Amino acid sequence: QVQLQESGPGLVKPSETLALTCSVSADSRSSDYWSWIRQPPGKGLEWIGYIYSNGNTNYNPSLKGRVSISIDTSKSQFSLTLNSVTAADTAVYYCARGLSFRAFDIWGQGTMVTVSS
Amino acid sequence: QSALTQPRSVSGSPGQSVTISCTGTNSDIGDYDYVSWYQQHPGKAPKLMTYDVIKRPSGVPDRFSGSKSGNTASLTISGLQAEDEADYYCCSYVARYTWVFGGGTKLTVL
């Protein structure tokens, strides 16, 4: 059974860069689609972006210009960077496996990131 | 892309059925049969309950069923149980590898 685990700093200063990594246990070739999704406290889910195993990416238009996702298949990891963060970027960040492009079938436990000075 | 529209809350008594709606547009729900539903208990990660509108992953009870008509998708939960109390989110593929979620619906089992 594939498991996902997010890691990274829990506190980021305003205007700085948020960087998270998702580690995939078991066979990372179980899917070619990997996404980041976030959830501000008390609010709903927001899709951030996706990466295909060959490195192709696409991002939520509302975040384009600030977000980047990369993949390291040799380490079974993919990563998220979000630049110029503000308090509005405070959220639980989840990584998720794509059931092709049809759904997100396996999720990490999530990691809380707070943007504050 | 705008979030899909869900009711903020629904409720039902044990044993009853409830339906949660999810309204989108011709560019998302209306254009693709790639609607999925997620259950989220407090402090937990979302769990996939249905996908491709009507399919259920292994292990999800058949009390959970999905449907779609035009630009609106629905999740019906029959035989409500106390453990069904949670937040539910719909999601749709929106082409060119983008996805959009609904705002979420809180289900209360009375």
Image (spheres, coloured by chain):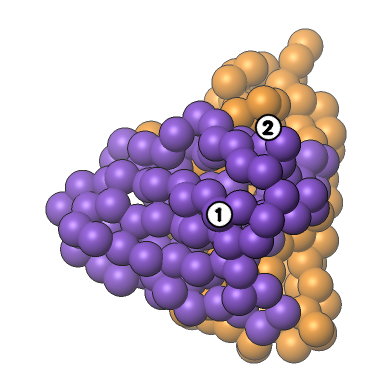
Chain colours: A orange, B purple
Q: Residue at x 48, y 78 (%)?
A: B55
Q: On the image, numbered disc 2 is attached to which residue?
A: A91
Of the residues shown, which amino acid type is indicated by label 2? Answer: Ala
Q: Can marks 1 and 2 be said to lie on one chain?
A: no
Of the residues shown, which amino acid type is indicated by label 1? Answer: Ser
Q: Residue at x 38, y 47 (%)?
A: B22
Q: Residue furthest top?
A: A117
Between A86 and B70, the one lying in front of the other is: B70
Judged by depth in the image, the label closer to the viewer, 1 or 2, is 1
Mark 2: give few (<14), some (14-19) or many (20+) Cα within 10 Å.
Answer: many
- Up the image or down, B65 lies above or below B2; here it is below
For mark 2, name the chain. Answer: A
Q: On the image, numbered disc 1 is attached to which residue?
A: B17
Between A86 and A108, the one lying in front of the other is: A108
| Residue B98 x/y as whole percent | 36, 57
Q: CA distance from mark 1 to mark 2?
A: 33 Å
| Residue B69 x/y as whole percent | 24, 61
